[in-house]
Amino acid sequence: MATITAFGIALKKHREVSNCDLEVKIRSGRRIWVSLSTLVYENSRNHRRLIVHFAHDISKGKKNEELLRKMTNLSRQLTSIPDVVGRRVPVSPLSEQEREILQIFSVGKNSTEISRKLRITLQTLRNHLHHINQKLHAHNRLEAVTHAIQRKIV
């Protein structure tokens, strides 16, 4: 409560509250960051000045700032790497039926419609999809279709 009152008085009297961050060593020998604010209060009756220093531990905030700085630097490094990551992984050749399955999926047909059109069971279609995902290094049919379109397979 005294801190709030002191700052309130400073604001009313238009006194500047200076502030800085310092890394200090505490009694245990550990180093912490503190935000140090200095408030000058002048008593209007006797014209004496009172100087008050407020210290607040901001170590967690400084640690978070440092982590953010490191993450930003790392992301800059990653984005500056040549497009090695974006290169397409070599693909095992797809059979004619696998290409046809991807083509039909790419126009929005579902598994039941594809199995009827190709006259195969849903399990056989799943097996084909499994092999397609392995060959294109995909994790699902949408990713497989996307890879196939990018590689101009479909």
Image: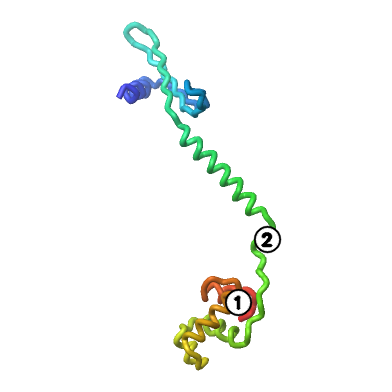
Residue 99 horizontal side relative to residue 28, left or right? right
Residue 138 horizontal side relative to residue 15, left or right? right
Quadrant where the N terminus sits is top left
Q: Position of residue 108 (x, y in %)?
A: 49, 81
At a point 63% along the width and 54% down the height, the residue shown is 79
At a point 50% along the width and 91% down the height, the residue shown is 120
Looking at the image, residue 27 lies above or below residue 116 = above
Residue type marked 1: Ala
* Residue farthest left in this picture: 1
- Assign a secondary structure to mark 1: helix
Q: Position of residue 104 (x, y in %)?
A: 53, 85
Label 2 crowd (10 A; few <14 / some 14-19 / many >=20): few
Q: Position of residue 114 (x, y in %)?
A: 49, 87
At a point 53% along the width and 82% down the height, the residue shown is 127
Residue 96 horizontal side relative to residue 122, left or right? right
Say how the picture is coloured: rainbow
Residue type marked 2: Asp
Q: Which mark is residue 83?
A: 2
Q: Which mark is residue 148?
A: 1
Q: Position of residue 53 (x, y in %)?
A: 42, 19
Label 1 crowd (10 A; few <14 / some 14-19 / many >=20): many
